[in-house]
Every structure is written in structure tokens, then in C-alpha cells.
Amino acid sequence: MTRPRDTDGAPSPLLRPALTFARRRKGPLGALAAWSLLESVRTFLTGYAVARALDDGFLSGDVRTGLLWLLALVAAALAGGLADAGVFRALGGVIEPLRDSLVRRVVRATLTRAVTSPTPADTARVSRLTAQTEIARDAAGGVLLTVRSFLFTSIGALTGLATLSPRLLPFVLIPLAAGLTLFAATLRPMAARQRDLLDADEHLAAFAGETDRAARDISAAGAAPLVAAEAAPLITAEATAAFALARWSAVRVTALGLAAHLPVATLLLATPTLLSSGLTPGELLAALTYVTTALLPAVNALLTALGTAGSRLVVVLHRLLGEETGETAPPGVPAPSLPEAVHTAMPTARHTARHTAIATPTQLHAKPSPPALRPTRPPLPAATLHDVTFAYGPDAAPVLDHLDLTVEPGEHLLVVGPSGAGKSTLLALLAGTAHPRHGQIHLGGHTARHARTLGTAARVLVPQEPYVFEAPLRDNLTYLTPDAPAPRITEAIDTFALASLASDSARPLRPDHLTPSERRRIALARSWLTPTPLLLLDEPTAHLDAGARAATELAFASHPATVITVSHHFPAPGPGQRVLLLDGATPYLGTHAALLRESALYRELAAGLGEPSAVGSRSTASTSSWAGGEHAQER
């Protein structure tokens, strides 16, 4: 439940628990006040001793009396040091129990909520139990110490001024009261603006976290502009809150000037009048001493502490004290859902079937042999790479070096090779999520950069770490294809064995509760439903058992799109199917049989297939694997 908010951000809901806590800590608070009285005495003597030393001692020619009053000033300073030590000891007796009380509240609320309403874990409670309780402890200690110092310093200074001459009080009290009144008027708005800024920051941080987890899918789907558009109002909201807080901070600075510096100016301006009316030089100097050495630092510390630590304390206590009633959710409109941005970025155009073109075996840098008959206007290749070089860093050795490759429409190309050979890098370049050092990449006539903006109209990438968001299974399956017909969705659920996750159609999936196999099958079903001309599959059968691998292989073998698959774990290629072998030295492109003859590395990788003689027999239900001495895994 969202906590109702005061229109001006007033901290009034905190008053009752604060008074209750104070009544329970009468002993430590009383000790704090007793030690603080010594601070009042020190402040009183700071000015009064100066006046007496000057008027009764040095100006009257009585050096001994003047020195005795200065000794009294030294004694007052020593007593003040003793008072400071006592104050800090008493402060611990107030602040540490406050922290313990807040921790108990958070733990009690968390346990109660876990028993009465078992919901997904709220990671914000970890922050409340650690960071926020420590913020409350430190801020409360600073505020209490500063307010105490101001009160008892003011008592000592004003008592001294009244003792010297009551005529001095208006020149100090009027500007001091004006500044404090203006500052008090800023407390509630500043607390509200501080809370607005914290809420806006939390919304933006939550959105950024979702964006970071889905970065590869956003890039692959071409949804970056829409995600940026959704982030814009969140950024604007945080900036607006920050500017509003800055404006009130400027008002606070004005209040500080009135309360701390204006009394000095009024005393100096009134000096001729005060001296002509009988005020002594010692009394005037004492008044300036009270203002500059006592009141000014105390007011400065008070306004600074209440304006910063006080605002944080109010916001944090609102959240911690609201934890018991569940009223800790930040107010305002929740951050936009990231999947919505990705969802709306997807095209709804239907895909048309394509004819498979099989190339003859050849080394990579030679282009596939053309078919015997060509139409008048041949279709554009599904993907072409010309002289492509890529390296991770300006001084790093190239992962792909001067690579030429043409993939025809409808072709199913298998990419194999040892780890680090550049297989996943090749898919990233085709998807437009990585860019070559030099060379050109085209997908269906579009550059890879342009294809990235087209989203699924150009290609779909299934990365090694598939993205599943917290939403029902149907939404996860259709966010690339929102208009997918119901029979097709049902077929995808059956094909990829997702029936157990579809039993409750309205229940959102919890990505952290899914197995790697379930996440993989959801991502594969999503891409299988998509009417894209080019599918890029990075380790599609990782984490799948033999049955799921066979179903996946069969589903994509009949898919009409051009399919480029990177895999360590895949059945033997079919007759005539081309295989790209990346080995870091001389890439090879050819059929399974040709590569077995030409490449020792390929023969080593293909050893996991079983009998080498079974070159021409591809069974869609085969569970043979491209092992290559490695287990398929998500990296």
C-alpha cells in the first residue's frame, strides 16, 4: 500500500513516536542537559569576562583585576572541555538505543509480512536494515548534538547580553528571530523536496537496473530509442526535484545570513548610539564576542545540520517507521515497464517462406558457387561480411581478421570452433551490437548499424544469456511478435515443453526462480515465433536435455528464416549444409564432409559426433553433440 503523503512534506507523523522515545530515555536526556548547562556557563563567561576584564581591569588601570577575569575565561574553557566529554558520553545513551529500536521495527515488520503475506523478497529491506538505519543513527546524533548546542549556547549568550545591558538584546534578537523564522519555513518544503528527489532517484535506478539486465535484447530488438524515450521523463523528474531542492537550499542560505551575520551588522551600525547612551566599550566588545564566537557558529551549525542531516533524517524515518504498516513504497507513479518499451518496438509484419540455397564446399575466402539458373533479379544475400576485422581494443590481436562471408536467404549455417575463436563475436557483429574495426557488414541490403534500428524486421539474436522479464509466459513469448495467433503460441509452448509454465496464464514468471533450461526454452520459443528474415542463435541448446535438444533442432531445421547457429552441442550437419569453422588462423567454409578432409581441427571437434562415416545421415532427432572437449554453457 502506498503511504498517503502530506501536501507539504511535513514531518508531523514522526512527532508521536519521537515523544514516546524521549519519554523512555529521560535518564540519558537529563544527563545530556546537565552536561550542556556547563556549556551555557562557558558561553556566559566568554563575553562577560571580556567586558569585566576591559571595563573593570585594563581600561580602569587595574591590571590585576583584568588578569583575574582572563583567568576566569580560561577556567570556563577548561570546564567547557569537560562538558563536551560528558555530552558525548550521554549522547551514546540516546542514539544507540534509537538505532536498536529502528532495527527491531524493520525485522519485526519483515517477519510479520513474511508470515501474513508471503510475497517475493523485498531487497529494499536490506537497505532499511543496514544503510538506512545507519543514516538515521548518524543523522539523529548530528541533529540532536547541534540543536542541543544551539539551545544552551543561546541561553548563555542571551543571558550574558541581558546581564551586560538589556538594550543590546533587540539588536541581536530581532535579526536572529527573523533568520530562524525564515529557516523554519523552509524545513517542511525541503523535506518534501528531499523525498521527491529520493523517490525520483529510486524510480530511475530501478528502470536503469531493468535496462541493464535486458541490454542485449534491447540492442538486438532495436528498441533503444523507445527505451531512451521512456527514461527521459524519469531523468527529467529527478532533475526537476534536484532543482526544486536547490531553490529551497538558496532560501536556507538567505536565512543563515539573516540569523548569523545580520546581528553583527546591526551592532556595528548602532555602535555610536549605544556608546552615547552609556554603553561601555567593554560591554560592546562583549556583545560582539557573544555574537561572533558563540551565536554565529551555533546558528551556522544548526541551519546546516537541519537543512541536510535533518531532511535526510525525516525522509529515512518516514520509511523506517512506515515499515511496520507496509507504507514504505515510494509515492508517485511507478517507473515504466522496460518490456513495454521493447514490446512496442517490434514490427508486426509477417515473414514469407524462402528457398534454401546450398553452397558447394570451399575455403572461406572463395564465394559459394552460383546456382545453375538465376532469376532475372536475384534476391539479396541474407548476410554479407566483406574484409571484416574485429578486435577487443586498439592494441589487441584481431578475433576476426579480414573475414569474407556470404550467407544466402533461407540458408542454415552452422558456426563451430574452439572457445575464443570469435563465434559469439561474429553474431554480435551481425546483430549490430558490436562494430568492426574495418570492413562492411550488410543484412538483406541494410548495413548492420541500420538493421539494428529495424529490430526484428532485420534480425533476431538469441544470446547466450537469454532475457526473461517478470510477466506471464504469454507476454514473454510474444513481446517480439505481439500479434502472434493463439494456435501458433500454443504450438510454441508444446514444441519447447513450456506447458508447466503456462498452467497459470496470469501468473508472472519469476526469472530468478527459473532454471537455465527454462529460460533458454522461453527465449528459443520467442525467437521461433518471430517473423524475422534472420535468426542468430548463440549456443541455442545449452542447458537442454537430449529430448529438448532434439525438439529444438527439429523446430529450427524447418524454420523458413536464414538461421546462423553458433554451437558446441549440435547434431551432425545435414547433406550439403555449410559449416563455418573459425580457428583463429585460417577460417574454412564448407560441408561437413569437405571439412573432415581439409581440417585436422574440424576432425577433432567432430570426434564427438560418433562415427565419421555417418557424414551424410542427418537425423533431426539425433542427440549427437559438437563437444570439442567442452561442455556447452552460458558465458
Image (spheres, grey):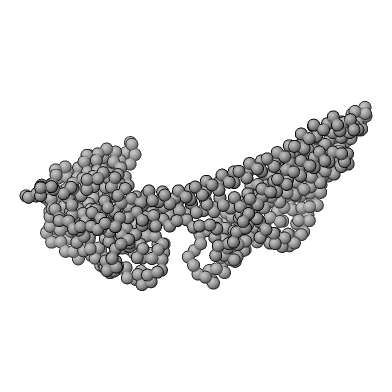
Please identify the residue farthest to the left as the structure is shown.
372
Q: Is residue 531 above or below residue 489?
A: above
Q: Quadrant of the N terminus?
A: bottom right
Residue 96 picture quarter? bottom right
Residue 624 makes an appearance in the image = no
Residue at (47, 56) in percent of width and height: 335
Residue at (82, 33) in percent of width and height: 270
x then y, percent, for residue 130: 57, 56
Q: Is residue 319 left or right of residue 550?
A: right
x then y, percent, for residue 404: 20, 42
x then y, percent, for residue 278: 91, 33
x then y, percent, for residue 466: 34, 57
Q: Is residue 142 left or right of residue 39?
A: left
Q: Is residue 482 left or right of residue 267?
A: left
Residue 199 picture quarter? bottom right
Of 2 and 610, the residue lying toward us: 2
Residue at (79, 49) in percent of width and height: 36
Residue at (41, 68) in percent of width and height: 507
